[in-house]
Structure formats: C-alpha cells, structure tokens
Image (cartoon, helix red, strand yellow):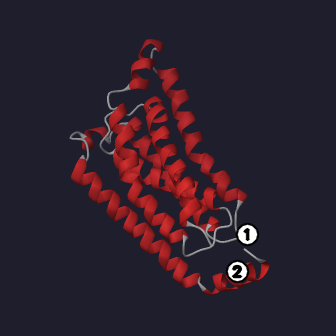
Amino acid sequence: MDTRHLIRTLTLDGRKAVPMARAWILALGGALVIAALLFFAAIGPRPDFALAAETWRFLYKFAVTLALFATGLWALVALARPGMRSRQRLAALLLAPCLLVAAILVEVAAIPTDQLGSRLIGSNAMLCMTFIPLIGIGPLAAFLLALRHGAPDAPSLAGAVAGLVAGGLAATFYAAHCNDDSPLFVAAWYLPAILLLAALGAVSARFVLRW
C-alpha cells in the first residue's frame, strides 16, 4: 500500500464511524444467534443446570469465559482501526487467565492430591475440544466480517483476538452443558479449544482482511 492510499483510507475511516458501529452490533447479534442455535440444536444445557448453579465451580466457569469475551471484544474494537491499538486493552486479556489461575490455586489447596488427575482429565474432554470450536466458528466469521468494515493495521493480531472473542462466547455456551466444573479441566481443555479458534482467526485474517 502506498502513502496516498493509506492517507485516503485513514480519511475515509473517520467517516465510517456510524457504519462501523452498526457492523459491530450486527456481528455481535449474529454471533449470539449462531452460537445459541447451534448450542441448543446440538447439545443444550446440562439436565441439572439449576442445581449446578448453586456451586461456585460451575458459576466460576462463566466468570472466566465471559471475562475473556468482554475483554477480547473491547480490544477487538480498537484493533479494527489503524493506529488505535491499545496496550491497556490488550493487557486486559490477561484478566481471564488470572481468574483461572486463582481458581486453580484454590482447587489444588482444597482437594486431596490423588483427586487432581481425575479433575484434570474429567469425562468430557473430547466433547469440549469438539464443540467449543464448532460453536465458535460462526461467531469468528461474524467478527472477521465486522473487521472488514475497519482497517486493522495488524490483521493477524486482530484475527487472533477475534478468535479469542469467539472462543469466549462459545465456551460460555458450552459451559452450560459441561458437567466438568473443575478449574483444572477448564485450563486443560477449554483453553486449547479457544486457542485453536485464535489460531484459525489469525490465519484467516491474513486473507480476509487484506486492504
């Protein structure tokens, strides 16, 4: 891209504030609908959802996944505009891992050592690794399409963050189905599934976000 093209793009970008906002609203709404439809059609919430909601481990899963979704979306909005990359917004992505590490420390201190292995492996590892990426692919596509209305100057980074946002959303839905509530299980299986979407987003963005 030459200098004149860059200046023209930056100038037009300032005029697209309203369309860009609309693009994010449509992307977020579309992502929620796609994820919800697939979740309820394929697996749905666990039978003992109401009972599980009385336990801290079950609720804490949502604290972690929603923290990732919210901080990721906050960073993604900034990454959609050239020169708007915010270190503070990217640093906020550490909130979810920190929450997870804190829960793991509590878990390790609270249960006998001989139970750690079973908590880590759980009973739904393959289901987790399958459905989080599956639920997240549609939202990832929606967020990448929204990014096309902006002009990210770091497409791979923006795509990776889009994958994290999609992963956080997908993991939130999947957490309502999963009966493995241990933070150890979340770290061992939710995290790789979400990172898979981040990798997919980073690679896809190199082609989708060319400008």
Amino acid on which the number 1 mark rests in the picture:
Gly
Within 10 Å of disc 1 (Cα), the crowding (few <14, some 14-19, many 20+) is: few
Q: Nearer the viewer, residue 120 or 163?
A: 163
Q: Earlier in the sequence, mark 2 or mark 1?
A: 2
* Residue at screen point 48% across, 76% down: 23
Q: Position of residue 42 (x, y in %)?
A: 24, 49
Q: Is residue 164 left or right of residue 80?
A: left
Circle 2: residue type: Leu
Question: Does 195 appear above or below 152?
Answer: above
Q: Residue at x 29, y 52 (%)?
A: 39
Q: Quadrant of the N terminus?
A: bottom right
- Given contact means CB atoms under 8 Å apart, are the residues at marks 2 and 1 in contact? yes
Which residue: 50% across, 51% down?
200
Spot occupied by residue 188 in the image (x, y as percentages of width and height): 47, 31
Disc number at residue 108?
A: none
Is residue 80 rendered to the left or right of residue 27? right
Residue at x 48%, y 79% (from the top left corner)? 22
Query: Residue 102: x, y in percent?
Result: 56, 34
- Camera-nearest residue between 107 and 185: 185
User: Helix, strand or loop at disc 2?
Assistant: helix
User: Which residue has dot 1 on it?
Assistant: 83
- Residue 3 horizontal side relative to residue 153, left or right: right
Residue picked out by circle 2: 10
Quick one: which residue is furthest to the top in this view?
114
